[in-house]
Image (tube, rainbow, N blue to C red):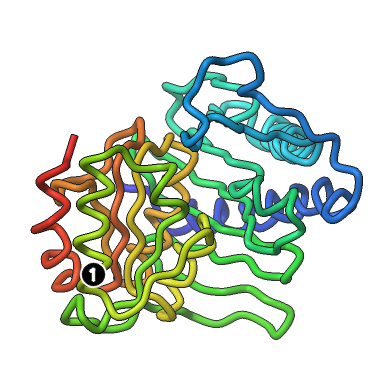
């Protein structure tokens, strides 16, 4: 069943409230004493693995708790899947998918590239998503109704830009040496060699820049549902596309991902990525 436009508009307004509740929990701890812990401590993991250091802070937990509290108050029938506190009714008609701080490594380093990812599934399909960066005063929101940026300067529609060839593309990934396995790293290097420019370490803020028409492609692997679901409606609402490394729809459990503003550029990159698709 299609989500009615008036219902979507109500939930769109609610996602702004969720971003503000999250920001209130996070901002007092940014560039302050954030109570750092390492969730990977005691695990036997290769030192060059992205998972070998898995930081979490009081801000991560406090923000997710604040979001969950507001959902429970206003929409107690909704389910929630979150990075910090797990699943609650994941088979509900509406399910919120949360990453309170995507880019915790940036957060603990004092870099304003971390974001809050809030996505909403309706009957298992991502229909609404936001990427918030409260330190910069930005909330990117998207759905089938379109995508927009809410900032200190007001509110405006955003859209991806045209990029017909990979040789003209600005691309991004988080940390290729740590996040990709051997075959994936080889595929990334092939795409990188063809692209005009690559930026590293931007985490999900790079997704927002594709939606805004400032970058052209983001390539990632090993993602969880909360790492990507908020971006799907935002990118699609801005005119872009999100697929796995085979060019297919991203499944509910994440995995390999490509975000592209232009389908032509994506198709060119998939020539290399498909060889390492899982």
Q: Quadrant of residue 265?
A: bottom left
Q: Position of residue 168 (x, y in %)?
A: 25, 84
Along the line of sight, the residue nearer the viewer: 59 or 77:
59
**Looking at the image, which residue is at 40% across and 47% down?**
177
Along the line of sight, the residue nearer the viewer: 115 or 180:
180
Q: Is residue 83 left or right of residue 187?
A: right
**Looking at the image, which residue is at 14% across and 73% down?**
264
Q: Quadrant of residue 210?
A: bottom left
**Is the residue marked by circle 1 packed among few (<14), some (14-19), or many (20+) residues within 10 Å?**
few
**Looking at the image, which residue is at 39% across and 52% down?**
4
Task: Find disc 1 in the rendering and name its residue.
Answer: 193
Q: Is residue 7 above or below residue 147?
A: above
Q: Quadrant of the N terminus?
A: top left
Along the line of sight, the residue nearer the viewer: 256 or 67:
256
The kind of secondary structure element at disc 1 is helix
Q: Is residue 117 above or below residue 53?
A: below
């Amino acid at each position: 069943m299609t989500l009615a436009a008036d219902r979507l508009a109500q939930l769109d307004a609610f996602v702004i409230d969720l971003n503000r509740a999250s920001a209130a929990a996070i901002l007092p701890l940014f560039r302050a004493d954030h109570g750092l812990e390492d969730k990977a401590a005691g695990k036997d993991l290769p030192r060059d693995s992205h998972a070998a250091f898995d930081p979490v802070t009081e801000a991560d937990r406090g923000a997710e708790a604040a979001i969950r509290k507001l959902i429970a108050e206003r929409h107690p029938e909704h389910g929630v899947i979150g990075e910090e506190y797990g699943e609650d009714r994941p088979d509900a008609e509406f399910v919120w998918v949360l990453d309170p701080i995507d880019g915790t490594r940036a957060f603990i380093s004092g870099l304003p590239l971390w974001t809050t990812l809030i996505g909403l599934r309706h009957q298992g399909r991502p229909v609404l998503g936001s990427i918030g960066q409260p330190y910069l005063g930005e909330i990117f929101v998207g759905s089938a109704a379109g995508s927009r940026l809410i900032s200190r300067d007001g509110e405006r529609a955003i859209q991806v830009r045209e990029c017909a060839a990979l040789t003209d593309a600005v691309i991004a990934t988080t940390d290729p040496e740590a996040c990709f396995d051997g075959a994936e790293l080889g595929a990334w290097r092939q795409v990188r060699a063809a692209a005009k420019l690559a930026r590293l370490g931007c985490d999900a803020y790079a997704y927002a820049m594709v939606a805004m028409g400032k970058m052209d492609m983001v390539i990632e692997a090993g993602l969880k549902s909360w790492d990507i679901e908020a971006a799907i409606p935002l990118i699609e609402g801005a005119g872009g596309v999100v697929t796995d490394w085979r060019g297919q729809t991203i499944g509910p459990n994440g995995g390999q991902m490509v975000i592209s503003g232009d389908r032509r550029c994506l198709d060119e990159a998939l020539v290399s990525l498909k060889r390492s698709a899982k």
